[in-house]
Image (tube, grey):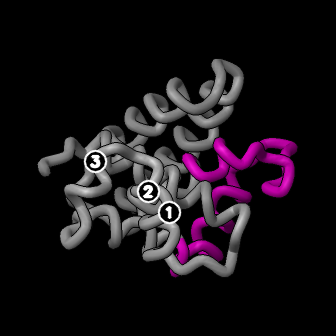
Amino acid sequence: MNFTRHQLRQLAFQSIFIRFFNEDLTSEDAINNTLDLHPFEKELEDEIPHYLIQTVNGVQENQEQIDQLITKHLNKWKIERIAKTDLAILRLTTYEMLCQPDIPNRVALNEALELAKEFSDDESRRFINGVLSSILSSLEAETKA
Protein backbone atom coordinates (compact mmCIF):
# COMPACT_ATOMS: atom_id res chain seq x y z
CA MET A 1 0.00 0.00 0.00
CA ASN A 2 1.32 3.45 -0.88
CA PHE A 3 0.97 6.16 1.72
CA THR A 4 1.32 9.88 1.30
CA ARG A 5 4.02 11.52 3.37
CA HIS A 6 1.21 13.19 5.34
CA GLN A 7 -0.35 9.83 6.23
CA LEU A 8 3.06 8.56 7.32
CA ARG A 9 3.53 11.67 9.47
CA GLN A 10 0.17 11.00 11.09
CA LEU A 11 1.30 7.46 11.93
CA ALA A 12 4.67 8.72 13.20
CA PHE A 13 2.93 11.34 15.35
CA GLN A 14 0.60 8.71 16.82
CA SER A 15 3.51 6.33 17.49
CA ILE A 16 5.47 9.08 19.26
CA PHE A 17 2.35 10.04 21.22
CA ILE A 18 1.75 6.44 22.39
CA ARG A 19 5.21 6.37 23.96
CA PHE A 20 4.20 9.15 26.39
CA PHE A 21 1.97 6.62 28.11
CA ASN A 22 4.33 3.66 27.95
CA GLU A 23 7.94 4.77 27.78
CA ASP A 24 9.11 1.16 27.89
CA LEU A 25 7.71 0.54 24.41
CA THR A 26 10.30 0.19 21.70
CA SER A 27 9.78 2.28 18.62
CA GLU A 28 8.75 -0.86 16.75
CA ASP A 29 6.15 -1.73 19.39
CA ALA A 30 4.81 1.84 19.35
CA ILE A 31 4.48 1.67 15.56
CA ASN A 32 2.76 -1.72 15.74
CA ASN A 33 0.36 -0.43 18.41
CA THR A 34 -0.45 2.53 16.19
CA LEU A 35 -0.98 0.34 13.16
CA ASP A 36 -3.31 -1.91 15.17
CA LEU A 37 -5.65 1.07 15.46
CA HIS A 38 -5.97 1.50 11.69
CA PRO A 39 -7.94 -0.53 9.17
CA PHE A 40 -5.03 -0.82 6.73
CA GLU A 41 -2.87 -2.55 9.35
CA LYS A 42 -3.34 -5.97 7.75
CA GLU A 43 -1.83 -4.67 4.51
CA LEU A 44 1.35 -3.63 6.36
CA GLU A 45 2.11 -6.85 8.19
CA ASP A 46 5.46 -7.39 6.49
CA GLU A 47 6.30 -3.95 5.21
CA ILE A 48 6.34 -0.94 7.48
CA PRO A 49 7.45 2.09 5.44
CA HIS A 50 11.07 3.15 6.01
CA TYR A 51 10.14 6.77 6.78
CA LEU A 52 7.93 5.62 9.66
CA ILE A 53 10.59 3.43 11.27
CA GLN A 54 13.37 5.96 10.67
CA THR A 55 11.35 8.85 12.10
CA VAL A 56 9.99 7.16 15.22
CA ASN A 57 13.43 5.68 15.99
CA GLY A 58 15.09 9.01 15.24
CA VAL A 59 12.84 10.95 17.60
CA GLN A 60 13.51 8.43 20.35
CA GLU A 61 17.29 8.32 19.77
CA ASN A 62 17.64 12.12 19.50
CA GLN A 63 15.03 13.11 22.07
CA GLU A 64 17.49 14.85 24.40
CA GLN A 65 18.89 17.06 21.60
CA ILE A 66 15.38 17.68 20.23
CA ASP A 67 14.00 18.65 23.64
CA GLN A 68 16.96 20.98 24.28
CA LEU A 69 16.27 22.79 21.02
CA ILE A 70 12.54 23.01 21.73
CA THR A 71 13.23 24.29 25.27
CA LYS A 72 15.59 26.95 23.90
CA HIS A 73 12.70 28.33 21.80
CA LEU A 74 9.95 28.22 24.40
CA ASN A 75 8.94 31.67 25.53
CA LYS A 76 8.15 31.56 29.27
CA TRP A 77 7.11 27.90 29.05
CA LYS A 78 8.54 24.71 30.44
CA ILE A 79 8.58 21.62 28.24
CA GLU A 80 6.78 19.67 30.99
CA ARG A 81 3.75 21.97 30.65
CA ILE A 82 3.25 21.41 26.93
CA ALA A 83 0.25 19.25 26.02
CA LYS A 84 1.36 15.76 24.98
CA THR A 85 -0.17 16.10 21.51
CA ASP A 86 1.64 19.38 20.94
CA LEU A 87 4.93 18.01 22.25
CA ALA A 88 4.67 14.97 19.96
CA ILE A 89 4.17 17.31 16.98
CA LEU A 90 7.07 19.53 18.09
CA ARG A 91 9.39 16.55 18.52
CA LEU A 92 8.44 15.01 15.19
CA THR A 93 8.91 18.25 13.27
CA THR A 94 12.09 19.28 15.07
CA TYR A 95 13.53 15.86 14.24
CA GLU A 96 12.61 16.32 10.58
CA MET A 97 14.25 19.77 10.53
CA LEU A 98 17.43 18.53 12.20
CA CYS A 99 17.88 15.08 10.73
CA GLN A 100 15.99 14.69 7.47
CA PRO A 101 17.59 16.99 4.89
CA ASP A 102 15.40 15.54 2.11
CA ILE A 103 12.40 17.27 3.74
CA PRO A 104 12.46 21.06 3.32
CA ASN A 105 12.09 22.72 6.72
CA ARG A 106 9.15 24.84 5.59
CA VAL A 107 7.34 21.71 4.39
CA ALA A 108 7.94 20.10 7.79
CA LEU A 109 6.56 23.23 9.48
CA ASN A 110 3.46 23.29 7.27
CA GLU A 111 2.87 19.59 7.92
CA ALA A 112 3.15 20.23 11.67
CA LEU A 113 0.40 22.83 11.38
CA GLU A 114 -1.76 20.32 9.49
CA LEU A 115 -1.23 17.76 12.28
CA ALA A 116 -2.13 20.43 14.85
CA LYS A 117 -5.32 21.15 12.88
CA GLU A 118 -6.24 17.47 13.02
CA PHE A 119 -5.17 16.58 16.55
CA SER A 120 -5.13 19.83 18.53
CA ASP A 121 -6.87 23.21 18.62
CA ASP A 122 -6.28 26.70 17.21
CA GLU A 123 -4.44 27.95 20.28
CA SER A 124 -2.09 24.96 20.16
CA ARG A 125 -1.59 25.47 16.45
CA ARG A 126 -0.48 29.05 17.05
CA PHE A 127 1.84 27.91 19.86
CA ILE A 128 3.36 25.16 17.67
CA ASN A 129 3.78 27.63 14.80
CA GLY A 130 5.57 30.10 17.08
CA VAL A 131 8.00 27.55 18.50
CA LEU A 132 8.75 25.88 15.17
CA SER A 133 9.10 29.20 13.34
CA SER A 134 11.66 30.27 15.93
CA ILE A 135 13.53 26.96 15.53
CA LEU A 136 13.41 27.33 11.75
CA SER A 137 14.81 30.88 11.93
CA SER A 138 17.68 29.77 14.15
CA LEU A 139 18.51 26.82 11.88
CA GLU A 140 18.47 29.10 8.82
CA ALA A 141 20.73 31.59 10.62
CA GLU A 142 23.19 28.77 11.49
CA THR A 143 23.22 27.64 7.87
CA LYS A 144 24.10 31.15 6.66
CA ALA A 145 26.81 31.63 9.30
Depth check: 70 or 60 in front? 60
The residue indicated by pointer 3 is 40
Q: Are there few (<14), some (14-19), or many (20+) residues within 10 Å of tag 3?
A: few
Q: Is residue 79 left or right of residue 16?
A: right
Callout 2–callout 1 Cβ contact below 8 Å: yes
Circle on res. 33 = 1
Left or right, 121 with reference to 33 = right
The answer to which quarter of the image holds residue 102 is: bottom left
The answer to whether mark 3 and mark 2 are in CB contact below 8 A is no
**Looking at the picture, which amino acid does disc 3 mark?**
Phe
Percent position of residue 131, x then y: 63, 42
Quarter of the figure with residue 91: bottom right
Q: Is residue 88 magenta?
A: yes
Residue plotted at (35% across, 47% down): 105
Q: How many marks?
A: 3
Amino acid type for the residue under numbered disc 1:
Asn
Q: Name the residue at 61% across, 36% down.
A: 128
Mark 3 to mark 1: distance in Å?
13 Å
> Main SS of the magenta segment?
helix
Q: Position of residue 21 (x, y in %)?
A: 73, 62
Disc 3 to disc 2, C-alpha distance: 9 Å
Magenta residues (range): 60-89
Residue 64 on the magenta segment: yes
Q: Secondary structure at mark 2?
A: helix
